[in-house]
Amino acid sequence: MNKKEIAEIKRRLNPEFHNVTCIRGCYVNGQGEIIAAFTRSLEGMGEEEAQKYLGIFKRVLSGVQGQNLLDIEFTPEQVINSPEHQLLMRLKDTGLTDDEAVEALFSRIIPTIHTEDHTLILIMHDGYDVPYRSQDGNRVAEMSTEVFHYILCAICPVKLTKPMLGYNPDTNDFRNRESDWIVSMPEEGFMFPCFEERAADIYRALYYTRDTAQSHEELVDALFAFQPPMPAAMQKETFQAVLQESLQEDCSYEVLQAVHEQVMEKMEEQKQDKHAAPLKIDKYDVKEVLAECGVKPANMEAFEQKFDQQFGQQARIDAVNIVSPKQFEVKTPSVVIKVNSDRADLVETRIIDGRAYILIRAEEGVEVNGVNVNI
């Protein structure tokens, strides 16, 4: 799914637009025991309560693609005959009215939860009457020919608050308020099937993780029998290590700046196409930049070998896990320099009187502790 398709589904998760037919829930304690299971309908809720439920599901579609939102792709064999895919299809096709299928989903998720907190597992079904879009992008609702049925699942920690003082309007003073179990925003979740090109793609699911340093392999395997990619935070650290170890003396500021700028340019070009998937980078894209910077062939060969070892020969990494779109950082043991990502050219390195310096071009608007200064 691209950003535009995700945003279209998120807009549905609003009390005014949704067609959520059913919400099923399972409340689990820290020992993995089911405390309660329930079925809710948004129609019988007040608007504020409905917004809270929809807000939880909306969070499952939030974050950065390639970091918080990961594509899950089923093989043709899985779609034809795998218990994981068959279960997801049953849940979708029955609108969560199949108790056996719902219980089977909960039984797959619960053993993968490793926390002392309680957990709330929520799953909803929605039927989206997809408006037709003309070639110029305008919606033509009366020409709709597709109803997109999908499920969203959210796995939320339920944490015990601390006892504290709180205002009591009946006595007009502050009294002790007992601790209570409060539902937090989801740590993990998924959507099935994906919404692509105005229709359902049953070969794909969208998986959500709040923590980009975690890929929750056990949960992903239980739900999809799929090996998730290396967590986003680890991808960035690993890529940085591959560059540093393979380039050796060629690992200069200028080389890293060039890699950053080239990837950023590709990302900006990709953003112009609202229908494009997030940009991915492979080893050949990076080697092209290294060659332009004059990196030695031996070091380029070492980069390719280490890249293959860490990511795989055919690997393509999400560009957002290679560079930070918002910031370019230069760090020494005593000083940290943070520059807008598109102005890395303001920083350069120089040898002056035999000593290495990092230079920052200063033109106007220089402040020291909030005070404008002249240079």
Image (cartoon, rainbow, N blue to C red):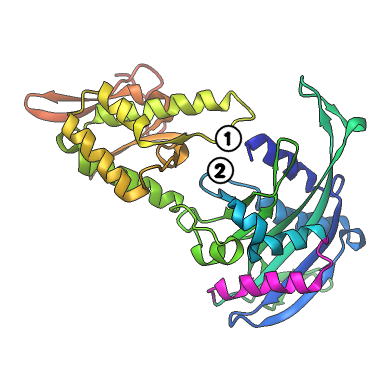
Q: Position of residue 140 (x, y in %)?
A: 87, 28
Quarter of the image for the C terminus: give it.
top left
SS class of the residue under badge 2? loop
Quarter of the image for the N terminus: give it.
top right
Q: Position of residue 257 (x, y in %)?
A: 31, 28
Asked if residue 153 can be seen in this view, the reply is: yes
Which stretch appears magenta? 94-115
Q: Disc 2 versus disc 1: distance between alpha carbons? A: 9 Å
Q: Residue at x 35, y 16 (%)?
A: 363
Q: Left or right of 270: which side holds 29?
A: right
Q: Which mark is residue 163?
A: none
Residues packed near mark 1 inside 10 Å, few (<14), some (14 to 19) or many (20 plus):
some
Determine contact: label 2, label 1, CB under 8 Å.
Answer: yes
Q: Earlier in the sequence, mark 2 or mark 1?
A: 2
Asked if 286 appears above or below 227 in the picture, the reply is above
For label 2, the residue is 65
Q: Position of residue 295 (x, y in %)?
A: 20, 28
Residues packed near mark 2 inside 10 Å, few (<14), some (14 to 19) or many (20 plus):
many
What amino acid is found at the position of numbered circle 1 in the picture? Answer: Ala
Q: Nearer the viewer, residue 339 or 27?
A: 27
For label 1, the residue is 277
Asked if 264 appears above or below 195 in the picture, the reply is above
Residue 166, image quadrant: bottom right
Please say whether residue 101 is one of the residues in the magenta stretch.
yes
SS class of the residue under badge 1? loop
